Amino acid sequence: MKITMVKKLLEDGSECKKCREVTERLNAHNEMNKLDRIAYADVRDPGSEGFKLAEKHNMETTPFFIVEDDGEETVYKTYLELRKNAFNQAPDAEDIEIEEKRKAPPDELDFL
């Protein structure tokens, strides 16, 4: 299994808020080492790898995850989906809180 996380970089070069929050959760669960790579959708470069992956997979928000397993690609829109389906782990309260934030009205999402 190969896992790619796609994050958004803002004009100042920092990661979007939700990307930082999800990275914190990955670290809290000692799961960062399960990621094979991180691709960035850099707002300063519309041709960046992350934007190309977002277009390919019809993703409009970050972060998201692409899991390649036995030649098949599965895209997870949320960390909660990744944790449940790829890592076979139940979400904890903080994971659920992050998921609720992602369901917030569109003006609070990190659109690409």
Image: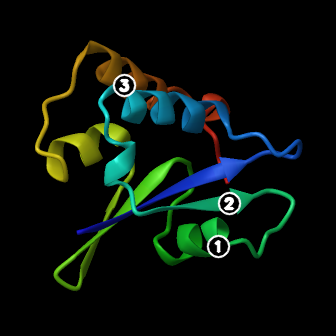
* Distance CA(mark 2)–CA(mark 3): 24 Å
In contact (CB < 8 Å): disc 1 and disc 2: yes
Q: Is residue 91 above or below residue 33?
A: above
What residue is drawn where x is 68% and y is 60%? 41
Residue 89's x, y, as percent? 13, 36
Q: Which residue shows up at 50% across the image and 26% down it?
A: 104
Q: Quadrant of residue 88?
A: top left
The amino acid pointed to by label 2 is Ala
- Mark 3 to mark 1 CA distance (whole Å): 27 Å
In the rendered view of the protein, which quadrant contains the N terminus?
bottom left
From the image, tell me which residue sits under label 1.
49
Q: Nearer the viewer, residue 28 or 78?
A: 28
Residue 52's x, y, as percent?
62, 75
Residue at label 3? 28
Task: Write the residue at 77% across / 40% down.
Answer: 14
Q: How many C-alpha atoms fall within 10 Å of the one at disc 3: few (<14), some, or many (≥20)?
A: few
Task: Residue at the far top: name it.
Answer: 93
Q: Residue flagged by tag 3: what amino acid is it?
A: Ala
Above-or-below relation of 29 to 85: above
Report crowding for label 2: few under 14, some 14 to 19, many 20 or more residues within 10 A (C-alpha).
many
Amino acid type at mark 1: Glu
